[in-house]
Image (spheres, grey):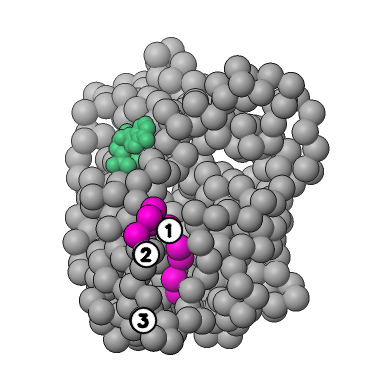
Amino acid sequence: MPDSEVVALAASLAERFAERATGHDRDGSFPHENFADLREAGFLKLTVPRTHGGDEISLTEFVQVQEALARGDGSTALALNMHLIRFGAERESHSYPPFWFDELCRGAVEDGRLVNTAATEEGLGSPAGGGIPETVATPVEGGWVLGGRKTFVTLAPELWYMPVLARIDPRDGGEAEIGDFMVLRDDSGVSIDETWDALGMRATGSHDLVLEGVRLGNDRFLGYRSRPKPSPRGRASGVWFALGVAATTTGVAQAAFDYAVSFARERAPNGLRTIAEFPGVRRRIARIALLLQRNRALIADAAAAWEGGEESGMLASDRVVVAKIDALNNAIEAVDEAMRVVGGVSLQKHRPIERYYRDVRAGLHNPPLEDRALEQIARTALDFPDAG
Ligand SMILES: Cc1cc2nc3c(=O)[nH]c(=O)nc-3n(C[C@H](O)[C@H](O)[C@H](O)COP(=O)(O)OP(=O)(O)OC[C@H]3O[C@@H](n4cnc5c(N)ncnc54)[C@H](O)[C@@H]3O)c2cc1C
């Protein structure tokens, strides 16, 4: 239960979001009014450092906020996750040029502006696969010209800052490099193609970003991804992201649990006993509670290990991927169990539980994916046995 003011506030916002969720899910529309509420409640600056006017909440507190928000609306929570992780991770990894980090913070604190990275492409898939983007940044006098199309750009209807991953072809041949470029909403040649019509997380506005001859100054170049700077906290972005997604997914499963419990306590076929008295239903409810508790323990353990920076037992970065993949699988199982408790009517479109069933699956396709996560754990165990 809420153990801080910000988590309690998230829970109360979630109640409002839950009332709007069905409509946005049905229409695939973006919940602008939820973001207006989040803005007003100061949630866009929760992870911004205090030196820059934010609240600088910890990773541990951040995951609690994500879970509380997702209990009302998974889409809103997942979309906010994309924005908040940028600041949380950057507090640790310092990967952005200081000018741009200052500007992102200023934009979030003073103007309520949102940021999210546009990395994925139709042909590339996830850049985590090691592919080269088709979006290209061509060097020109005084800067760059960007062209390409990015997919899955969550928050697209409201984004202002869009760091874009692009290929840089060397003038003299040789291997292409990969870099990030800061694209702004009002740059000439930037548009959003409203393509997002998905099974789950339908209200995240994860549309395509289209870049046509976007002319940028040299100041928009954020750095080469193909030349990562060695840093002990260099994985911070992946850590904040993975745990934020795990917590969001747990919040969706918690909503399914809430629904199944209240349904079981009221549903009395033929007006006889409620189904809450049946041993099969009781076992399923207990199983869901167990899975949810396991998720919270895994996520809290990974967050504490990463924050503590101590490497005893399993490596913190491995605990993070364990928490993400296990939390996703547990949450999916939990929602499936909740569907069985509710029975055939769980399929009806007017009941929120069918949305939880769809939303809970989306995180499977957010990094780290299970195969890559397992490979990371195997690498530590088999190739670097003294590391953890
Ligand atoms: C709700 C939602 C929101 C998202 N928001 C954003 C966003 O805001 N910004 C953004 O940039 N992206 C976003 N994404 C995209 C996401 O991060 C992934 O890039 C996308 O889901 C594609 O990943 P993939 O690994 O399935 O695709 P692919 O790379 O096409 O992979 C397909 C399959 O092949 C396997 N595979 C691929 N390469 C390898 C390899 N080298 N070795 C072994 N197996 C491999 C993968 O594991 C997967 O099973 C979002 C996705 C979702 C579902």
| Residue located farthest toward the top when viewing the structure as drawn | 279
Label 1 vs 2, first from the N-terminus:
2
SS at mark 3 in the image: strand
Q: Which residue is mark 1?
A: 178
Is disc 1 surrounded by few (<14), some (14 to 19) or many (20+) residues within 10 Å? Answer: many
What residue is shown at x 47% (from left), y 59% (from top)?
A: 82
Is disc 3 surrounded by few (<14), some (14 to 19) or many (20+) residues within 10 Å? Answer: few
Q: Amino acid at mark 3?
A: Val
Residue 121: give x, y in percent of width and height.
28, 55
Q: Which residue is mark 3?
A: 140
Q: Does the residue at mark 1 contact the one at mark 2 (Cβ under 8 Å)?
A: no
Q: Is residue 337 magenta?
A: no
Residue 339: give x, y in percent of width and height.
32, 30
Q: Amino acid at mark 1?
A: Ile
What residue is shown at x 73% (from left), y 38% (from top)?
A: 305
What residue is shown at x 48% (from left), y 74% (from top)?
A: 221
Q: Which residue is mark 2?
A: 172
Magenta residues, dominant SS class: strand
Label 1 vs 3, first from the N-terminus:
3
What residue is shown at x 20% (from left), y 40% (from top)?
A: 348
Image quadrant in which you'd find residue 331: top left
Residue 258: give x, y in percent of width and height.
45, 39
| Residue located farthest toward the front when viewing the structure as drawn | 172
